[in-house]
Amino acid sequence: KQDSSREHHGLHVLAPCPMPRMPYEAKTPARVLKCQTCSRSFGCCRRRYVCMTCDRYQCGACYGGRCVCIGACRSLTCRRCRERVANRGELEACRSRMEDGVCVTMGLPKPGPIAYIAAPRKIMVWFSLQSSTSELQWATLEQKRGRPVEEGQIPATEIIDVGNTGSLVELYTRGRTRPIILEFTAPAERDAWCRYLQLIHKVLGSESEPGTLLGRSRA
């Protein structure tokens, strides 16, 4: 009635202000009682939110964003998914350089407990990324009958962690008690490849189909 009265007197009718979209608080399933990131129990002081991208049930601290109680809107995606999208874009930007490869001195740890007391076996190799299989490939520069004397692969999904000691890069993988050592000729090259390997670990380690992230292999 108030709107029709305003229209009758030639006054402008204001449209209702739309409320900002917020990530919905999860009410189902009831069996999810803890945050799927930090494992803390939900309650009246710890609300439950669901990411619209990964569908994970998380508390406000793990979900990220600004506080809902002061009227500010949280993002529709959690902090983890936002970081994953950013890392994926950075990985795609440097994918061609990783596929081209680099010459590096690689230190392979000895198998078993002897790796703690024996120095790693060092070989000069060509180190690169194979996008079609999501593997890091290496091959010795020394060849015999047109083929590398020794070569191997490191699946991206087996990378546990990547470290930079300031003089070399350490690549921790499953099944090895000691890290694989990568020694580069230039500090800038070392820092760049350390970041490349970290991106592979962060992006491929959280995806069910890692081969689709790195795009098609080059012909």
Image (cartoon, grey):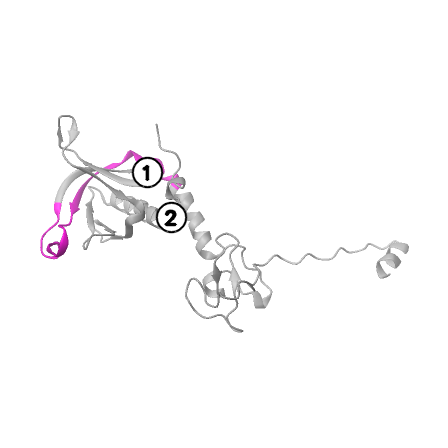
In the image, residue 113 sits, relative to residue 107, either above or below, namely: below
Amino acid on which the number 2 mark rests in the picture: Val
Horizontal side of 198 relative to 52 (left or right) equals left
SS state under label 1: loop
In the image, residue 120 sits, relative to residue 93, either above or below, namely: below
Q: Position of residue 115 (x, y in %)?
A: 13, 54
- Residue shown at 29% from the left, 34% from the top: 100
Q: Position of residue 138 (x, y in %)?
A: 22, 38
Q: Nearer the viewer, residue 174 or 124?
A: 174
- Residue shown at 47% from the left, 58% from the top: 56
Write the start and end of the magenta stretch as one range: 92-121
- Residue shown at 22% from the left, 52% from the top: 175
Residues at marks 1 and 2, CA–CA distance in whole angstroms:
15 Å
Q: Residue furthest left?
A: 118
How crowded pointer 1 is (Cα within 10 Å; few <14, some 14-19, many 20+) is rated as some
- Residue highlighted by disc 2: 203
Q: Position of residue 70 (x, y in %)?
A: 58, 67
- Residue shown at 85% from the left, 61% from the top: 2
SS state under label 2: helix
Q: Earlier in the sequence, mark 1 or mark 2?
A: 1
Q: What label sits on residue 133 in the rendered view?
A: 1
In the image, residue 88 sits, relative to residue 139, either above or below, namely: below
How crowded pointer 2 is (Cα within 10 Å; few <14, some 14-19, many 20+) is rated as many
Tell me, yes or no, whether the highlighted magenta stretch contains residue 81: no
Q: Position of residue 218 (x, y in %)?
A: 35, 30
Tell me, yes or no, whether the highlighted magenta stretch contains residue 115: yes
- Find residue 127 and report its image quarter: top left
Horizontal side of 181 relative to 9 (left or right) equals left
In the image, residue 55 sits, relative to residue 136, either above or below, namely: below
Horizontal side of 194 relative to 91 (left or right) equals left
Amino acid on which the number 1 mark rests in the picture: Thr
Q: What is the quadrant of the N terminus in the image?
A: bottom right
